[in-house]
Image: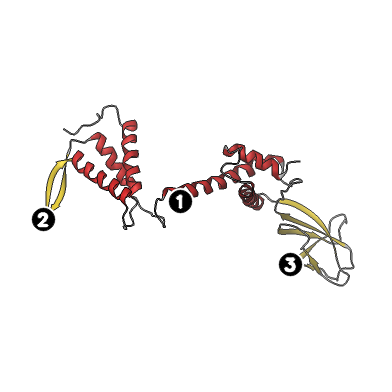
Amino acid sequence: MTTLGDIRTALRLDLGDPGALHWDDDALDRHIARALSELGTAIPRELAVSLATTPGSRELSLASIDGLIEVEAVEYPAGLIPPAFVRFATWNESLTLHTAGAPDGSDALVFCTALHTLDGTGTTLPPHLEHVLATGAAAYAGLEMAARTGGQLNLNGNAPLIGASGAVAGVLGAYLVLYPHARVFVLFRIVIPIPLPVPALWMLAVWIATQVFYALVGSDEPVAWWAHIGGVIAGAILAVLMKRRDVPLFGGR
């Protein structure tokens, strides 16, 4: 029977981390447990649990059913043909039988759904769902790694930034390799703004140098300088790779 250790080993292979360099066992177990809970909620196990009633009482405790999600039906008394299904109500871990007379101590059969279990001895998860569990756990582990990596790339930062400036920088990078000699108008202000035509290469070179300067030296402004630099590089590379054949590089003369 598949155990937690088996799922963990398969997960390490999927993540390319057989030597446990990036995730320790506790971290992977946490991701597996989260994926198991989500999977169990979507595709729960179906149970038929026999519970003894107390003579004279319509109350039944559901505390013994681990991971209970929902009670679907109750048969009382159990074992009759045809089955004697009765109305009921649930509240927290208590079930109340809506029977004409009080139970006499006979067993009640509770049909319910519950979360799957997985530990060092085995699992209730069907074999065909084990790869789904591993895939979900790998997704959560990858999300953790992405968040960790993003935090490491946020050099000297203490807060996330949201904006489209990186994408705009990508457009500038693409323009730089496609039309560096095109003249663009820059507003130069002495007393009033004056539009000055300058080659795009000059303007973008000054702008890129400014981004590199503030990225290396630092700034109190909440600006993602590294995102601008990365956007320019990505835009320039993608423009070379994705441009139409009839569009020359370094044009705009």
Question: Which mark is on residue 151?
Answer: 1
Q: Residue tagged by mark 2?
A: 190
Q: Nearer the viewer, mark 2 or mark 3?
A: 2
* Residue type, numbered disc 2: Ile
The N terminus appears in which quarter of the rendering? top right
Residue 198: image x %, image y %? Answer: 14, 42
Q: Residue at x 74, y 51 (%)?
A: 46
Front residue of this view, candidates 52 and 249: 249
Could you classify mark 3 by the number of other residues whose Cα lies within 10 Å: few (under 14), some (14-19), or many (20 or more)?
few
The secondary element bearing badge 1 is classed as: helix
Compared to residue 204, the image places residue 249 above or below, namely above
Indicate which label's residue lies in the foreground, 1 or 3: 1
User: What kind of residue is marked 1?
Assistant: Gly
- Numbered circle sitting on residue 170: none
- Compared to 134, does 85 lie above or below? below
In percent of width and height, residue 8 lies at 66, 43
Give 112 or 166, whichever is nearer the viewer.
166
Q: Tell which circle, 2 or 3, labels the residue nearer the N-terminal end.
A: 3
**x%, y% of residue 174?**
28, 38
Q: Residue at the location (31% across, 50% down)?
A: 217
